[in-house]
Amino acid sequence: MSQTAAPGLTEEEVARYWKDGFLVFDDVFGEEEIEALRKACEQPQILALRSQHDYETKTVHALGITSLHPAFLELATHPAIVERIKPLLGPDIELQHSKLATKPPAKGLGVFPWHQDYAFYPHTNTDLLSVMVMLDDATPENGCMKMVRGSHKLGVLDHAKNGRFVAECQESRYWLNPEHPEDIVYITPKTGGISIHHALTLHGSDANLSGRPRRGIVFSYRAADAYQLADALFDDTGLMICGTKQGVVRCDAGFVVLPNRGGDTPFGPTWNQTGPFAKSYNSARQTGM
């Protein structure tokens, strides 16, 4: 995969991100690069993360893929992505998690409810975002993401029922009866394009009606001074993307409701903050290996 110098963001693009909560770019990666990523997705260690039944019947998120194939690690650290997120997160950036997101090819399946990513994995500040690299064109027909423009300014919305966290925002007025219907935006990057959205941007997706799969690689990134407060710790959580770990934590998120999933560890195994693969990678990076 090419590692040539990549452009950052213009001042207008930075302003638009903070106004809308998302950005979309086409033609970021070429056809050969995308085909190599598709092949990597079919490797046994990636296929093992999801059952064939799940793949054919619902949206599947195969998590922690940077530790399973070098193509995904290279993509997570690719200048075409990193140079675009530095103006939004700062010079010191970590990976929060990586995943392959697939929509089932069967028509009418794969709805994903409206939600904010931050509600799943709250941090001490909200400087987190996700980048989706499309392996297929994203269209309304195949269940592309929909976002509520400017919703990242609403703060953290309610994602709980009866005191337990659910993967669905409960404040439907923001998408069922918005004051400005034009603020519901279909996110449609073409194959090789990317979308970037803030962790508080309200988004979801409809069913896939195309009869063909819709695949994307997703990287969730965080400013290195954002400390995770709850939810899962993946093998690549805390992988250093650029810059250094400064040993400081910025706390400006205010009062945070943690996602209570029940059980013996209701708020998740986040105590060490860095997954085993990320720890090994960071150590090698520091020694120049």
Image: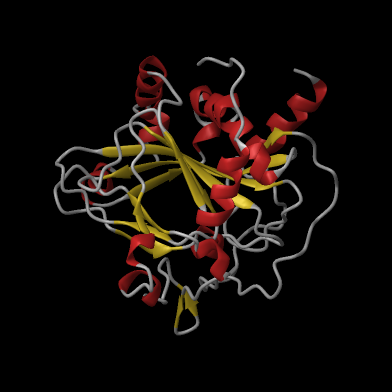
- Residue at horizontal 61%, vertical 75%? 257
- Residue at horizontal 50%, vertical 55%? 20
Classify 207 as above or below 156.
above
Q: Residue pushed farthest right?
A: 247
- Residue 132: which quarter of the image? top left
Q: Is residue 90 left or right of residue 30?
A: right
Classify 10 as above or below 227.
above
Colour basis: secondary structure
Residue 31: x, y in percent?
A: 35, 18
Residue 18: x, y in percent?
A: 58, 53
Residue 236: x, y in percent?
A: 60, 40
Q: Residue pushed farthest front?
A: 12
Identify which residue, 275 or 211, lies in the foreground. 211
- Residue 88: which quarter of the image? top right
Quarter in which the C terminus is drawn? top right
- Residue at horizontal 75%, vertical 65%? 252
Residue 239 shows in this picture: no
Identify which residue, 129 or 61, lies in the foreground. 129
- Residue 67: which quarter of the image? top right
How many callouts does the rendering have? 0
Residue 240: x, y in percent?
A: 70, 36
Residue 70 shows in this picture: yes
Classify 48 as above or below 201.
above
